[in-house]
Amino acid sequence: MSVTVYTLRNCEVSDKAVAALRERGVDLEERRVDENADWWEEALDYAMAVPIIIWEDGRVELGWDGEHG
């Protein structure tokens, strides 16, 4: 399964989300919005807060509570 995860450097919730997804073997592309203006603009199409998880099937999940996916 491949997902895109919009994150922010120094965001503990983003770090937990990415780590947990990787532990589950999820193939992901992490896009740190504070490092790329285009990614920032893309993320704003979904929400004003990270993490934003875009699943391969198009589902969008906002935030992280450890139970996503």
Image (cartoon, helix red, strand yellow):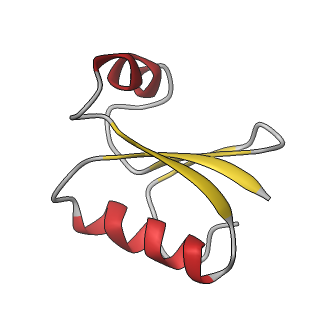
Name the residue: 44% across, 56% down.
Answer: 63
Left or right placement of residue 16 versus residue 27 in this view? left
Q: Quadrant of residue 34?
A: top left
Name the residue: 43% across, 28% down.
Answer: 43
On-image quarter of the N terminus: bottom right
Residue furthest to the left: 10
On-image quarter of the C terminus: bottom right
Q: Residue 13 in the image: x percent, y percent?
A: 31, 66
Left or right placement of residue 15 versus residue 26 in this view? left
Task: Give the vertical position of 14 relative to 34 (above or below).
Answer: below
Name the residue: 23% across, 33% down.
Answer: 35
Q: Residue 29 in the image: x percent, y percent?
A: 55, 48
Name the residue: 35% across, 60% down.
Answer: 14
Q: Residue 18 in the image: x percent, y percent?
A: 46, 66
Left or right placement of residue 25 versus residue 61 in this view? right
> Which residue is more in the foreground, 67 or 17?
17
Q: Residue 12 in the image: x percent, y percent?
A: 24, 68
